[in-house]
Image (cartoon, helix red, strand yellow):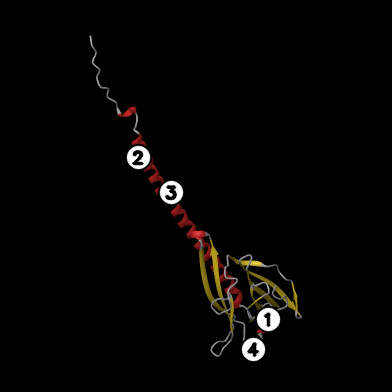
Amino acid sequence: MSRTRLPRRFSRDDGTTMIELVVGMVLMSIFLAMFTGAIVMMNSAMNKSQAVNVTASELNGAFRSLDTLVRGAAAVSIPGVANSGDWYVELSTTSSGLQTCTQLRVHIPAEQLQQRTWEVRGAVATKLSPWAPISSGISNGRAVSGPTSQPFYLIPVRANTVFQQLSFNLASQSGSGTAQSISTSSFSVAALNSSAALNNSGTCQEQGRP
């Protein structure tokens, strides 16, 4: 008796073809690339936003500190660059009955706006404090001279002004690569205790400009 072979029917559970595997892998690669790109873009945007917030915060903090400091000054020195390459300016206050000097500098290696103070007794400096940071990430420490470029610029008393004014041009930098952010701020503050009769050449020069 002869046997007739019937064709075998394969179900879909028996396996997949090579073409189906390749198509599935290609689709997975596309979706993975899209997902990875979205994550990278989201992280980049977050880092950029964080860098912007950091620079804005540093400049706002500097403005608050400098506004209070300069307003109470009785004299402001002529800003200049020391041998170190750092920009300097000095302010003298006498509200306590004793002359107190505050020296500001943009320290290039540390990228900081810093200050230190000392008292003056009989033209001799005493109680010199260490340098303390006011704000960080200040990136224009090597700025060229000019009223809109150098970090400190003295606006002298003129016919239409009563007080000395100190102008600040600061640039704060944070982040790196595509997330890097640089914010700039320019503002002027009047020294409300100053007068036109001041000689700025010797204001608070006891400690020099290191």
Residue kind at label 3, given as amino acid type:
Thr
Indicate which disc, 2 or 4, sits on the residue closer to the N terminus: 2
Name the front one of labels 1 and 3: 3
Instruction: First in sequence, mark 2 or 3: give its number.
Output: 2
Q: Which residue is mark 2?
A: 23
Secondary structure category for the residue under label 3: helix
Q: CA distance from mark 4 to mark 1?
A: 13 Å
Q: Nearer the viewer, residue 77 or 65?
A: 77
Badge 1: residue crowd in 10 Å (few <14, some 14–19, many ≥20): some
Placement of the C terminus among the 4 image quadrants: bottom right
Quarter of image, res 144: bottom right
> Please, what is the three-letter code of the amino acid marked with disc 2?
Val
Mark 2 or mark 1, whichever is nearer to me: 2
The type of residue carrying mark 1 is: Thr
Q: Is residue 167 above or below residue 180?
A: below
Mark 1 residue element = loop
Q: Say which residue label 4 marks.
A: 197
- The residue mark sitting in front, 2 or 4, is 2
Work out which residue is located at the far top of the displayed protein and give it.
1
